[in-house]
Amino acid sequence: MVALGMQRHCDATLRAEKSMNEHALREQICELGRSMFERGLTHGSTGNISARCDDGWLLTPTGSSLGRLDPARLSKLDWQGKLISGDPPSKENFLHLAMYQERSRNQAVVHLHATHSVAVSVLEEIDPADVLPPLTAYYVMRIGSLPLVPYYAPGDMELAQAVRALAGKHHALLLANHGPVVAGSSLAAAADAVEELEATARIYLLLQGRRARMLTPEQVAAIRRRYPAG
C-alpha cells in the first residue's frame, strides 16, 4: 500500500510538472507573438508560432493576431494534426507539422510574413538553392543556407510536401511570395533565427545596386564548423 501510495504521489507530481511546463510555454508563445507584432515583424492576422509540449504541440489559432494571443485559447494538437483542445488551429498547421516530422530534434517553429523576407522571396534574380548571400557571420551562424520553396496557394497541401522535401537538411526555408518558416532547438532559438533572417533580408535589399563585400567561402566554412546552424 505504501509503494502504491508513493507511485500515485509520483504520478501526480509528474502531471503537475507537465502542466506547469505547458502553462509556461503558452505564456512564452504569447509573449513572443506580442513582441513580434509590436516590432512590425508581423501584421494583421498573419504569421504563426508553434512549440512542442509533453503530449503534443501548441500552435497559434486560425485568424488570430500575434499581438493579441490568449494562452488558454492556443490550439493544442497531436502528432497526426488532430485538435486536442483550444481554438481551431492556423490553416498553415501542416507547415509546422512537416517541419517537426522531418526535424525531431527541433522544439519550435516560427512562420512570418515579415516585409523584407517576403520582398526578397518575390525577386526574380535570387538563387533558389540559397536565397541570401553570406553578408554577416550571425546570418551564417543562425541560418546557414536558405532554400526557396516554390509558390503554392495558401492551404495547398502540396506546399507541405515541398517543405518536407527540404526540411530534413534545412531548418530555415523561404516560401516564394509568402515568407519564412524557421525551426529551432527552442522557442528562443527559432525566434532569434527568423529575426536574423529578416534583418539580413533588409540589409540585402538596402545593398541592391551597390557592390558588396560578402564573407568568403573559407570564412563561411570556418563559422559553420564552429557554429552549426539549426
Image (tube, grey):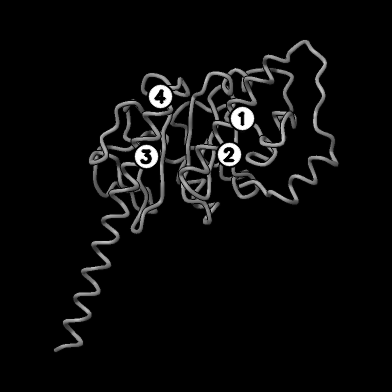
> Looking at numbered disc 2 in the image, what kind of residue is underneath it?
Ala
Alpha carbon distance from label 4 to label 1: 26 Å
- Verify CB contact (< 8 Å) between mark 3 and mark 4: no
- Verify CB contact (< 8 Å) between mark 3 and mark 2: no
- Residue wearing tag 4: 37
| Helix, strand or loop status at disc 3 | helix
- Mark 4 crowd level (few <14, some 14–19, many ≥20, 10 Å Cα): many
Q: Nearer the viewer, mark 3 or mark 2?
A: 3
Residue 162 numbered tag = 2
> Looking at numbered disc 4 in the image, what kind of residue is underneath it?
Phe
> Looking at numbered disc 1 in the image, what kind of residue is underneath it?
Pro
Alpha carbon distance from label 3 to label 2: 26 Å
Alpha carbon distance from label 1 to label 2: 8 Å
Q: Earlier in the sequence, mark 4 or mark 1?
A: 4
> Looking at numbered disc 3 in the image, what kind of residue is underneath it?
Ile
Residue 29 numbered tag = 3
| Helix, strand or loop status at disc 4 | helix
Looking at this view, is 149 or 179 the one in front? 179
- Return the x and y of residue 7 as percentages of the image width and height: 22, 80
Q: Nearer the viewer, mark 1 or mark 3?
A: 3
Q: Earlier in the sequence, mark 3 or mark 2?
A: 3
- Mark 1 crowd level (few <14, some 14–19, many ≥20, 10 Å Cα): some
Alpha carbon distance from label 1 to label 3: 28 Å
Looking at the image, which residue is at 31% across and 28% down? 64
- Verify CB contact (< 8 Å) between mark 1 and mark 3: no
